[in-house]
Image (spheres, coloured by chain):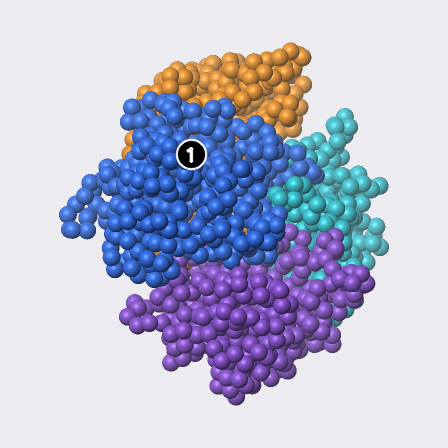
Chain colours: A blue, B purple, C cyan, D orange
Amino acid sequence: MSESGGFTTMAGARADREAPHVGIGMLGYAFMGKAHSNAFKKIPYMMYPPPAIPDLVAICGRNPDGVAEAAKRYGYKRYYTDWHELIADEEVAIFDNGAPNNAHMAPTIAAAEAGKHIFCEKPLGRSPEESKAMWDAATRAGVKHMVGFNYRFLPAIRLARELIESGKLGRIYHYRATYLQEWVLPHYHTPMTWRLEKDVAGCGALGDLGTHLIDLGRFLVGEVETVAAMTRIFTEHRPTADGKVGTVEIDDAFVASVGFANGAIGTLEATRFAAGRKNHEIVEVNGEFGSIEFDLERLNELNVYWVDSEPKTTQGFANVKVSEPSHPWWSNWWPQGHMIGWEHSFIHELTHFVDCVANDHEVSPYGATFEDGYRADCVSAAILESARTRRHVDVVY
Amino acid sequence: MSESGGFTTMAGARADREAPHVGIGMLGYAFMGKAHSNAFKKIPYMMYPPPAIPDLVAICGRNPDGVAEAAKRYGYKRYYTDWHELIADEEVAIFDNGAPNNAHMAPTIAAAEAGKHIFCEKPLGRSPEESKAMWDAATRAGVKHMVGFNYRFLPAIRLARELIESGKLGRIYHYRATYLQEWVLPHYHTPMTWRLEKDVAGCGALGDLGTHLIDLGRFLVGEVETVAAMTRIFTEHRPTADGKVGTVEIDDAFVASVGFANGAIGTLEATRFAAGRKNHEIVEVNGEFGSIEFDLERLNELNVYWVDSEPKTTQGFANVKVSEPSHPWWSNWWPQGHMIGWEHSFIHELTHFVDCVANDHEVSPYGATFEDGYRADCVSAAILESARTRRHVDVVY
Amino acid sequence: MSESGGFTTMAGARADREAPHVGIGMLGYAFMGKAHSNAFKKIPYMMYPPPAIPDLVAICGRNPDGVAEAAKRYGYKRYYTDWHELIADEEVAIFDNGAPNNAHMAPTIAAAEAGKHIFCEKPLGRSPEESKAMWDAATRAGVKHMVGFNYRFLPAIRLARELIESGKLGRIYHYRATYLQEWVLPHYHTPMTWRLEKDVAGCGALGDLGTHLIDLGRFLVGEVETVAAMTRIFTEHRPTADGKVGTVEIDDAFVASVGFANGAIGTLEATRFAAGRKNHEIVEVNGEFGSIEFDLERLNELNVYWVDSEPKTTQGFANVKVSEPSHPWWSNWWPQGHMIGWEHSFIHELTHFVDCVANDHEVSPYGATFEDGYRADCVSAAILESARTRRHVDVVY
Amino acid sequence: MSESGGFTTMAGARADREAPHVGIGMLGYAFMGKAHSNAFKKIPYMMYPPPAIPDLVAICGRNPDGVAEAAKRYGYKRYYTDWHELIADEEVAIFDNGAPNNAHMAPTIAAAEAGKHIFCEKPLGRSPEESKAMWDAATRAGVKHMVGFNYRFLPAIRLARELIESGKLGRIYHYRATYLQEWVLPHYHTPMTWRLEKDVAGCGALGDLGTHLIDLGRFLVGEVETVAAMTRIFTEHRPTADGKVGTVEIDDAFVASVGFANGAIGTLEATRFAAGRKNHEIVEVNGEFGSIEFDLERLNELNVYWVDSEPKTTQGFANVKVSEPSHPWWSNWWPQGHMIGWEHSFIHELTHFVDCVANDHEVSPYGATFEDGYRADCVSAAILESARTRRHVDVVY
């Protein structure tokens, strides 16, 4: 059964029955564990009436004290320090994988084999091979699967998708996306972290930030066909926690020229070396009849230009506050102009997934499936290959 | 015991003991009831470790079905349709008044007399007399009292206050504040609502929007001394729910010139007739050594100018993303640049109040007490008097 | 003969005849003398084909060396140190008065009596009485007269006027105008200048900056009916050129609530004490069907909101780059997006005046006549009276 | 003799002597002819005292009526329809080549051989070979030579250069530059023009817009080492003036990843298919200690971020109005905040060149020489080669 294009702003019709419950098993209790737990807790009373009610069954992490405190803090019934136990928990219907990248594959495949529906953070794998294995396992098991490309679930991005999908922008010429941060500038003396280790993270700014740009490009414009890219490691040596010096082997930054299957071209760039940029994700699309511009740090806004708007003398990019009842998900929140935040993307995203699981809807096309995760990883791999081989690389899916 | 200037980002020291619980009795379940309930529910796990844990004891409203559903939705143990019962509930330690303005005074005074601590939405009263009666009652009863001037609890506004309080702006010359909305434009055929009825609301855009500007002026600059104002009713007749025509007797908009006790001057303006303005509250302060500019629709930002910044050739208003761990309350939330929303002001605000109640801190100076509510209402009254008498009016407190 | 609403972008029809010449006599060679001379010099080849060609006949100033150099620099045929001689010059058809405010009245009246057409910088007089005398003299003499409210001649402001005039904004509810500068902040140790002397300047920020806001209010919204205002002198004592201490007797800043004859209300404010504001003139208008916002420091832009634009989901303030061939005066300049500057307002303004003089067009309604200058001064006088008497003052014209 | 880093804001010392005159011979009277003529005419009285006075000797174009009118309009003493005559004119000291790209090489080489100093519009040649021939000819002749990369002469860009050159940004990590226009969108039915013909223009958006980005990259960051690029022709067939259909053979748009010799990476992009973008040139630089952002449509502004600015809580991108007396060239113009326009870049640029010619200064490093023009064309050629061969291409100079 298809979601048929609506947001999960719950139809009144649903209020006459009790919402089904789905048990959540959460792997990880740090940044993503916090963001996801918060989302699950808000669904029942803010995405109201909820399509399903997430029951916080169990949370899992390696540090016993840490995970015990997290369970108490967020209200999980129990906790585990071994993810095998989490997956074995019979009350868990959804396995939510918020672990570091190197702990995405094995638990996810095991969860699929145990018949759990799976939500996994991005990037799905550290390589297309890992992603493919996860996608295959989920497909074989017949479970629902979704990747945490949460920006698809911002009202402004969803509005952009709908405008493009409806044909209002006409033929698409350009996609332009940058994701700039400053969190590992050398003078901050940032030591080695798992996000800088090749074995754990797989890739650097590309995997962490760039995959968002790739996914949004696929979501808004279409399939990426060719890439021509460069990467850089600006700071090769960093102190480690044990007082030694570690060598950074993954990208601090990348730039890429990209060609889409539909003829559009674009640029992609992500870096952690952009002084002053906190979480500066910019997405622009230029089409035949209009243009769109988005800035994650002003996530309640979308700038839109229409070639044919009247009167001609007042044409310009409209700074749309995406906060009207007619905007995606907005009726769940507050009156117009009473803005929402970054965390709300997770609430919308996980509402969609629990709805898909509990009411047998399709995750696609508005949610990213493991196939989408795999395809994003294929583009990432092509970018790394292009940088290494100094050639244009056609993406192989 | 004083809060001593810190935010309620909980000290590690507190983690070693169990947080005290405080019972919440909520009056109203519409817009404000939703915003407050959401805040209470997030305190325990997001303002972590919490200074106190709000227990959702009871919610009260006149419509039995509506309030029953609200109780279930937000997780209140029970509900009432008569506020006297809410106040009589022994488990209720904090009475939270989110009712329309004409239901502020009587329940609040009764709650004070019953020894409840009280949080009341703004404007405190429909007149200074009402506010004074509420303040007196709370003082007599020795209970904690706070008014819902929630914008004091936005990180950007708190930062502004700290910069000014520390003397970094020097002498203050100007305060400039506008609050523009478009929710009752005539072509929207907005019918009469309680916010347009004089008996219920007391005053119009002035009470609903203008009091925020007045409170922020007092919070940032100091006491208002003199006002010279005008008001307008642009649409006098509106349809009522029962098919008749109602007469609007309260202001659709006001403008005021104001003089502060410290010599600064300013302008205040609020309207519901500003096409395209969703929730456009702008606050500007110009001082001897710097300037500050704030826009509620971009609430994670503060524009700041320093006269003495170096190098001189790059002086300009800095667009500060108020989202660093060093910013007020931010460490409770997400990494830098991962923005929060309007609702978060309520979370900070109510965390402060439950902390004050549970741990005997002072609500002042960062929270607004009933005295602050009263003083804001005195300024409002002076504005109306100035508009009516066509004279400058010195505010009498 | 009327200008009939068009810009002075010269019709091709005019190219078939030689443009008439008009002799210019310029009083003053400092800031305004430079801006006007530059404008006159550009008219023949940039406002092409020109409606008339200004001949730079003579320039006048009190300092013989200074004025001699200015004459050489700008290409005036001769110079004078006594304005009586300038007016007596038979080649002078237009007397352009760019002198300080206390030298507006006497030379202007004498010029009118000598049959010269007159362009005078703003504010027209130091008082309504002075302005009235000048207006009367010009009317009696039957000469063309215009006041230098140059911002009427910015493409963005002219576009705003046309949108409002055409009825596209519907009924006007609000006018909001501020003019903020920082040029006399105390730490800049700004000494006394003629702009701070009551006898010379007449009034302070109000006369220098505020009259622009008043004129634009009258140009865009309509006649001002009532004002309620306050003024401030923040720095009373300043060093004089001769090493003494001068006392400032005119306003450093003013704020005013204003009521328009058509029912709109507004706020006006001007100051020289706004840290970081270089030339920050903001003008906003809210009407029934739309809103307009202008910032002088981004003078090529106008933000416009339409209540009825489609699709509803992308409504927002459009950031219009007023640089298309269809925009006022733009076809005289460069391709779209190749921006013009502040000085261009003078070129448009003086083109209009030489056109009016040479081809017998009306200065009104797009140019400001001495009547407009007088009416602006009446509003200024009412503002000062309101501040002094602490009453609302109805403007007497 | 070197210009030694100062702007050509004329030292008072120079006022005591008569400025030397240099005769100008202008080729072309359309867009660039207008912009250059305007600049020459303003130098004597606005860049005051001028380092040299341009005498408008002659203008040249193929259409006799057109060029005759242009000569009259701008005040050239005489006109020619054959550029050989222009070059043969003995009064011409500077040959200014504002012709289409296919008329850059031959006249320029001939002018050099005739001993004329040469200013040539960008791109210098249609290929590096053409540029090299022009550079060699100028070098052999010992004449001054400069290419019209006018954006180097905007105060904001010059400020950016000085900040970077002084080391204040530290090591440079990123350069990000886009130049977006919408002038040939298909629905505008733009017919073929010389800018779309391969033989005349050489290359499309790359040559017209992209070379500005390349030159600014070289000016601000350093030499480009490697490129990886793609190009697109979105509209292959366009109507011609004679009613036929022409085939577009040059790029409507390009994107490129670039590596700099100093280790920085970047992206370049130019297009004529960006709906709503009038003249949207954005330049960003991220360095170790700060970042810079520039937008040509707001050319009086530069956004600057400093990693070490104090206090930390108010760090942010400062929106610098580059309009203080301390800013490049500003003292020639108006008080702070009284903004200049696009045309002013030409005035500064040509002032520099006439100064270099008349007073024997070096065009480098602030002006772009023919060597700079050649090097920019080498990067362009590498971009086209990369797009064609689908490989990373190392730029060969």
Q: Amino acid at mark 1?
A: Asp
Q: Please, which residue is most extreme toward the bottom here? A: B140
Count residues near mark 1 (Cα–Cα under 10 Å), then give few for <14, some for 14-19, many for 20+. many
Please state the horizontal and vertical placement of residue B282, each as a whole percent of the image.
56, 60
Going by the image, does B234 lie left or right of C343? Answer: right
Residue C15 drawn above or below residue A37: above
Q: Does residue B151 appear anywhere in the picture?
A: no
Disc 1: which chain? A
Name the image quarter holding residue A337: bottom right
Residue D129 drawn above or below residue B89: above
Residue B268 drawn above or below residue B309: below
The residue at the point 35 percent across, 34 percent down is A137
Q: Does residue B66 appear anywhere in the picture?
A: yes
Total labels: the figure holds 1
Looking at this view, is A316 or B332 the one in front?
A: B332
Check the picture and name the quadrant holding the C terminus of chain A.
Answer: top left
Q: Which residue is mark 1?
A: A372
The residue at the point 64 percent across, 63 percent down is B270
Please state the horizontal and vertical placement of residue D178, each as a whole percent of the image.
46, 34
Looking at this view, is A90 or A209 the one in front?
A: A90
Q: Please, which residue is most extreme toward the front here? A: A90
The residue at the point 72 percent across, 69 percent down is B197
Residue A332 drawn above or below residue B125: above
Looking at this view, is D242 or D228 the one in front?
A: D228
Going by the image, does C13 lie left or right of D19? Answer: right
Please state the horizontal and vertical placement of residue D317, each as a whole percent of the image.
43, 50
The residue at the point 49 percent across, 56 percent down is A44
Name the image quarter holding residue C352: top right
Please state the horizontal and vertical placement of residue B53, each as a whole percent of the image.
41, 70
Going by the image, does D370 lie left or right of B82? Answer: left
Going by the image, does A44 lie left or right of B331? Answer: right
Q: Secondary structure at mark 1?
A: helix
